[in-house]
Amino acid sequence: MSKRSTGSSILTANRLSDGRAVFLDFEGAWNESIDVALVARTSQELTELEARGAFDSAQNLVVEPYLVEVRETDGCLVPVRQRERVRAGGPSILDDVPGYAAPETARAPLVERRADRVLEEAA
């Protein structure tokens, strides 16, 4: 896994079946929408997310899981690094391609994504 962040982070990977960028959600599933990603805010939560990523990688569900530092802005998760914003939002050059439709995003209240609640339920 990657370097530890000091702020809020989410876990991302690529789904093995189709290569799409996915994010661990608050139900413990891998979702294509960053808006439902589980947010870790403490060192323990980060460790638990990394362990879940390693487990799912060993089960061949995802490849190369790693933590992404995010900011919570206007009720939405926004990755700090540009690379991760592109991964989350899809290609940045396809707006003028005929027939391209951006993926729909689900909006969930940030309170629902508290890592401590979900990780306790999963244990």
Image (cartoon, rainbow, N blue to C red):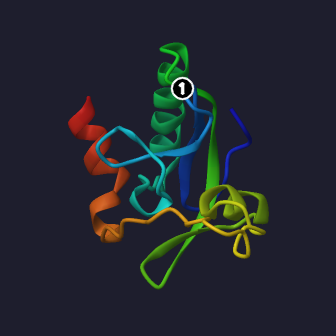
Which x, y percent locates residue 27? Answer: 29, 43
Q: Which is nearer the eye, 16 or 115?
A: 16
The answer to whether residue 48 is left or right of residue 88 is left
Q: Which is nearer the eye, 30 or 111?
A: 30
Q: Residue 48: name its quadrant.
A: top left
Task: Tell me the amino acid under the disc marked 1.
Answer: Ser
The answer to whether residue 26 is left or right of residue 62 is left
Q: Residue at x 54, y 33 (%)?
A: 50
Q: Residue at x 48, y 14 (%)?
A: 59
Q: Residue at the left extreme?
A: 121
Q: Residue 79: name its quadrant.
A: bottom right
Q: Residue at x 72, y 67 (%)?
A: 94
- Seen in the picture, residue 101 relative to 66 is either above or below; the reply is below
Q: Quadrant of the C terminus?
A: top left
Q: Quadrant of the N terminus?
A: top right
Which x, y percent locates residue 78? Answer: 59, 70
Q: Which is nearer the eye, 40 or 74?
A: 74
- Seen in the picture, residue 48 relative to 110 is either above or below; the reply is above
Q: Residue at the front extreme?
A: 98
- Pointer 1 local density, CA inside 10 Å: few below 14, some 14–19, many at least 20: few
The answer to whether residue 7 is left or right of residue 24 is right
Which x, y percent locates residue 115? Answer: 37, 50
Q: Which residue is mark 1?
A: 17
Which x, y percent locates residue 114? Answer: 33, 57
- Seen in the picture, residue 117 relative to 101 is either above or below; the reply is above
Q: Residue at x 77, y 58 (%)?
A: 83
Secondary structure under tag 1 reads loop
Number of callouts:
1
